[in-house]
Amino acid sequence: ELLHLVINGKILMHSSCVDDTLIVGFPNAGKTYQTYKMVAEGGTLISEEYTVIEGTMAKPYKSVMRTCFSKSSLKVAKMKTSLFEKFWLACTTLRAWLFPFMYEAVIWKEIPVSGKSSEIKKIVYGSTGEEIKDWKKFAILCENEFPYMGSEFLQAYAVASGFDILGIQEKQRNLIKQFVETVYPRTFTVRNY
């Protein structure tokens, strides 16, 4: 699916979109926290967990996504939890305390999104809210989540069939560069001498 999207000029990001802001980051960077903080402040949830980007437009990958919530994310989202979810969160909290490098204290919930598209005007990193204006940083975030170049299956297929996996990677990077530089156009000052 990822390769098909790139071939068709689209980028799939492990990200969320609220109004005109794309929220990106490495795992555990606070994407869900930032997303639901913005939604609690009145923002419209465009996409959750995965976002498809075409040009500067963002749209949901699916209309309902499965998302993990920590206790702090649930609190900032003002999301109600069932008795079972409270119990499950308590169990995952204990498990994370016992095995901190193996598990997170989270529960999973299915979240419907608006189904709308939105033009991206800002790209922020997780809970810090730092703007990502450098296309290379954005590319690292994108390729970290979908490292298809590291897939032994795709590598073997490319070698056996002549499939141009390097061409697709280059196309993805060009799409990423074009996207970020369109959201954050460079301005140059002309000096008269």
Image: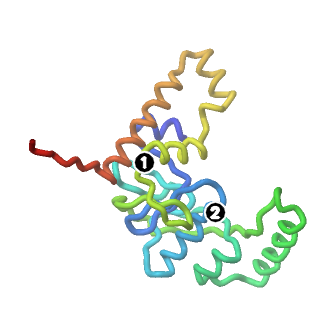
Quarter residue 120 falls in: bottom left
Q: Residue at x 41, y 38 (%)?
A: 8
User: What residue did someone put label 1 on?
Assistant: 134
* 16 vs 175: above or below: below
- How dense is the environment of label 1, judged by Cα within 10 Å: few (below 14), some, or many (20 and up)? few
Instruction: Identify the mark at residue 32; answer none if there is no mark.
Output: none
**Amino acid type shown at disc 1:** Asp
Which residue of the protein is positioned furthest toward the right in this rendering? 98
Quarter of the figure with the C terminus: top left
> Going by the image, does 137 lie left or right of 70?
left
Secondary structure at numbered mark 2: strand
Q: Residue at x 60, y 65 (%)?
A: 30
User: What residue did someone put label 2 on?
Assistant: 66
Q: CA distance from mark 1 to mark 2?
A: 29 Å
Sequence-earlier tag: 1 or 2: 2
- Residue 175 lies, in percent from the top left, at 39, 40
Which residue of the protein is positioned furthest toward the left in this rendering? 193
Secondary structure at numbered mark 1: loop
> Going by the image, does 21 lie left or right of 67?
left
* 94 vs 144: above or below: below
Closer to the camera, 81 or 76? 76
- Residue 54 lies, in percent from the top left, at 38, 48
**Amino acid type shown at disc 2:** Arg
Instruction: For the residues labelled 1 and 2, say whether their Cβ atoms are less than 8 Å apart.
Output: no
- Residue 2 lies, in percent from the top left, at 53, 40
